[in-house]
Structures are given as C-alpha cells and as structure tokens.
Image (cartoon, helix red, strand yellow):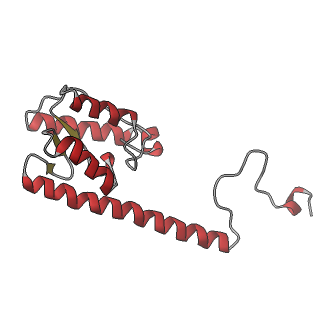
Amino acid sequence: MSTDEQADKGVSLAAQRAKVEAYCRLYDLELVTVIEDGGQSGKTLKRPGLQTALTMLRKEEAAGLVIAKLDRLTRSVIDGGTLIADYFGDKGSQLLSVEDHIDTRSAAGRLVLNVLLSVSQWEREAIGERTKTALRHKIAKGQRCGKVRFGYDLAPRWEKFGA
C-alpha cells in the first residue's frame, strides 16, 4: 500500500512485494495472493485491497495477513484496535509485519503491535502539525500555497501588461 507518488514510481510497491514474498519463503508461509492498494494511504481502512484481504480472513480463505510495514496497514490506534478486535485478537487470524518484526501469534508480538500503532498515529499527527505550521508561515509571508486553479496563472498583474 502506498501513496500516489510512490505508486507512480512503482519502486516502493515492488520493494514491498519482494519483502513480503521473501518473508513468506523464509518462514515457509503459503502466500495465497498479493493484494496492493497502490495510491492509497494507510490513514483509512476503506481501501479496496484491504477490504478484499479482510474478506478473505473472514471467509477463512487465508489464515493471516503479511504486510511489509505496519504503517502501510494503518496509522490509527482506533483503526488498529478495530482490526485487532475483529481479526487478529481472539479471532485467530495472524498479522505479520516484515519490517516491524510483528507476529501476533505471541503476547510479545501483540505488545509490539500496540506500541507501534501508537507511534504510527503520533507520527501522522506530527507530520500534519508541521505541515500546517509551514503553510501558515508561507501564507503570512504572502506566498502562494496549493495548486493554481484552472483559468488562473501565476504572473503578477504588472508583468502581464508589461508594466
């Protein structure tokens, strides 16, 4: 799962797929399918690929979910809690995160999962705060923020008329 920019370049999705496939080979896990949500953010659970994976878990078509990194799954403590309660807690499905070394089959793995969910949410919120501060600073200095709307250009009036 990846942002638009990462999906466009394709390197990140290919690297994530390679990590998951190598992990499954190393630990002799059967890889039922690879599902990618290219261009989708981990800030919501409403992603087509994730919903397909969760449906497979509900129907017991897969025993667990292997992800490249936790923040590709979610960056929300609430959404993470929902996933744990509905799929990975007592429900019996496994969650394995390659880069974060999470394995919910053990108490230690579940502890690490909960700690990293909190860190991921904090990171997302901190990025948002820094972005807001930077945009406020640019606006205060009279600098343009955002895309130029259709029908407008960036040249000041006096440049358009040769003044």
The quarter of the picture where the N terminus appears is top left
Residue 65 lies in quadrant? top left
Report the label total: 0
Drawn side of residue 48 relative to residue 30, left or right: right
> Depth check: 18 or 135 in front?
135
Q: Position of residue 30 (x, y in %)?
A: 13, 28
The quarter of the picture where the C terminus appears is bottom right
Q: Which residue does the image show at 31% across and 59% down from the upper left?
A: 120
Q: Which residue does the image show at 32% across and 30% down from the upper left?
A: 52
> Depth check: 87 or 96 in front?
87
- Whether residue 59 is situated above or below residue 89 in the rendered picture: above
- Inspect this view and state whether residue 70 appears: no
Q: Position of residue 82 (x, y in %)?
A: 28, 48
Drawn side of residue 52 relative to residue 125, left or right: left
> Depth check: 92 or 36 in front?
92
Q: Position of residue 71 (x, y in %)?
A: 31, 51
Residue 159 lies in quadrant? bottom right
Drawn side of residue 98 relative to residue 138, left or right: left
Q: Position of residue 108 (x, y in %)?
A: 9, 56
- Inspect this view and state whether residue 92 appears: yes
Q: Which residue does the image show at 40% across and 46% down from the upper left?
A: 44
Q: Which residue does the image show at 38% across and 36% down from the upper left?
A: 37
- Whether residue 55 is situated above or below residue 120 in the rendered picture: above
Residue 127 lies in quadrant? bottom left
